[in-house]
Image (cartoon, helix red, strand yellow):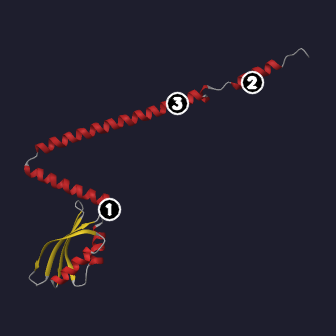
Amino acid sequence: MSDINLHKAAESDIRISRQKSIIKSGPFISLTILIVVMVAYGITFATKQTSEKRKEDLRKERDTAMASLDQVSMVEAVDFQYSVDNIAFNVDNKKNPQKVLEETVEKYMIKSSYLKSLAYNGVENKLTLELASESFRDSASQILSLKNSDLFKDIRVIDSGRNQDKEAIVKLDAFYLQ
């Protein structure tokens, strides 16, 4: 029994167990990650090119449509675009007309004057107010109250006068700070 060489058999078993499968090897994993990254980059690049081409096609289509419109349709399209821009601005800045009314009218109105009309222009970021009061002195106090508020950077009087009830009517623009 002393002539049996068991040492060689054990070495061959160790060599077999040391061999890794190709899937678990470092170069295979690196190559797989590289391929996945390249495919992701290719998809992103192709999507970007497609969207830019689509955007350019839509721009050309809009320009040809605008060129074919008559004057009335052009004014309507521009008016519609103005409305869309105004809505987009309001959504972006999250100006709620109810909040605007509460911030200005309820907080800065004096007792002797009241609001006849209110219009918010989101594109110019201004508030157009029409105020009525018993006298021009009360109107001046109301304008001063709005001017001293921390909401507006400028208050401009557009028109003033008296109505048939002898009330002092003042129309003004109040421009927001932002």
Q: Amino acid at mark 2?
A: Ile
Question: What is the quadrant of the N terminus in the image?
Answer: top right
Residue 2 % position (x, y): 91, 16
Marks 3,1: beta carbons within 8 A: no
Marks 3,2: beta carbons within 8 A: no
Residue 34 % position (x, y): 50, 31
Residue 130 % position (x, y): 17, 74
Label 3 residue SS: helix
In terms of depth relative to the viewer, which is nearer, 93 or 142? 142
Q: Amino acid at mark 3?
A: Thr
In terms of depth relative to the viewer, which is nearer, 173 or 36? 173
Label 1 residue SS: loop
Badge 3 is on which residue? 32
Q: CA distance from mark 3 to mark 2?
A: 29 Å
Looking at the rendering, which quadrant does residue 28 occupy?
A: top right
Q: CA distance from mark 1 to mark 2?
A: 71 Å
| Mark 3 vs 2, N-terminal side | 2
Q: Local crowd at mark 2 within 10 Å, few (<14), some, or many (≥20)?
A: few
Q: Which mark is residue 20?
A: none
Badge 2 is on which residue? 14
Looking at the rendering, which quadrant does residue 11 occupy?
A: top right
Q: CA distance from mark 3 to mark 1?
A: 47 Å
Q: Local crowd at mark 3 within 10 Å, few (<14), some, or many (≥20)?
A: few
Q: Nearer the viewer, mark 1 or mark 2?
A: 1
| Mark 1 vs 2, N-terminal side | 2
Question: Residue shown at 21%/82% (left/top)?
Answer: 113
Badge 1 is on which residue? 94
The answer to whether residue 1 is seen in the rendering is: no
| Mark 3 vs 1, N-terminal side | 3
Q: Amino acid at mark 1?
A: Lys
